[in-house]
Amino acid sequence: MVNIDWSKANRHKRGDGHIQLRKTVDGKHYYKDEHVYVWELYNGEKPKGYNIHHIDENPSNNDISNLELLSFSGHKRRHSGHILKDGAWWKPCGMCGVLKEEQKDFYLTTAKGQSKYFSICKQCDRERSTEYRNNMIANDLELFVARRKNNNGKYYSKNKDNPNYLARKKATQIRYLEKKKRLLNSGE
Ligand SMILES: [Zn+2]
Ligand SMILES: [Zn+2]
């Protein structure tokens, strides 16, 4: 492993705004992100599983006061609007937009062995479920009423008085008998 003096390296601004340090030693090219280099000058080697985050979200501002060490998951959270408050993550609800505590105000779901918090808060989820249920009930009721309506626009009080219902029931019975006959004929 070559010891590289990055203080005299060429600075190259990447398309995404990050500054890359480039150095050629004995004909070999070496690269390092400037924000990592600056952070390590003050803190020593960056631990594995961590990112250096730009606090003002300007990837070219590599002043040490603008750099923060975050775990991969913490870094991802930070970029999706999460805030660390007294050791707990807070995030904006995807529906009402209010900043709420992730562990307390969001449901946790486990899909494919991975734990994940809902993107909408418990309150919004409850309201959405209630709305969904009410819609279902309304739809069912509409269907129920429509089925019982006779040709004169009146309602049948019982299914057995409804000719449409009786016709459907009869058709189902015929299908069942035909299927039974087919099965009896095929199985010798
Ligand atoms: Zn970042
Ligand atoms: Zn909400």
Image (cartoon, helix red, strand yellow):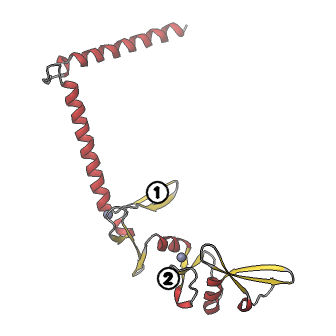
Q: Nearer the viewer, mark 2 or mark 1?
A: 2
- The amino acid pointed to by label 1 is Thr
Q: Which residue is mark 2?
A: 55
Q: Position of residue 130 (x, y in %)?
A: 26, 51
Q: Is residue 83 above or below residue 173?
A: below
Q: Position of residue 8 (x, y in %)?
A: 74, 91
Count neighbours of disc 1 (C-alpha within 10 A) and say few if under 14, some if 14 to 19, many if 20 or more: few
Secondary element under disc 2, as helix, strand or loop, is loop
The quarter of the image holding the N terminus is: bottom right
- Quick one: label 2 or label 1, which is nearer the N terminus? 2
The quarter of the image holding the C terminus is: top right
Q: Position of residue 11 (x, y in %)?
A: 69, 84
Q: Residue at x 50, y 74 (%)?
A: 74
- Which of the labelled discs sits on residue 168, or is there none? none
Q: Quadrant of ligand 2?
A: bottom left
Q: Residue at x 60, y 74 (%)?
A: 49
Drawn side of residue 141 relative to residue 108, left or right: left
Q: Which residue is mark 1?
A: 110
Count neighbours of disc 2 (C-alpha within 10 A) and say few if under 14, some if 14 to 19, many if 20 or more: some
Residue nearest the observer in this picture, 95 or 20: 20
Secondary element under disc 1, as helix, strand or loop, is strand
Which quarter of the figure has residue 171? top left
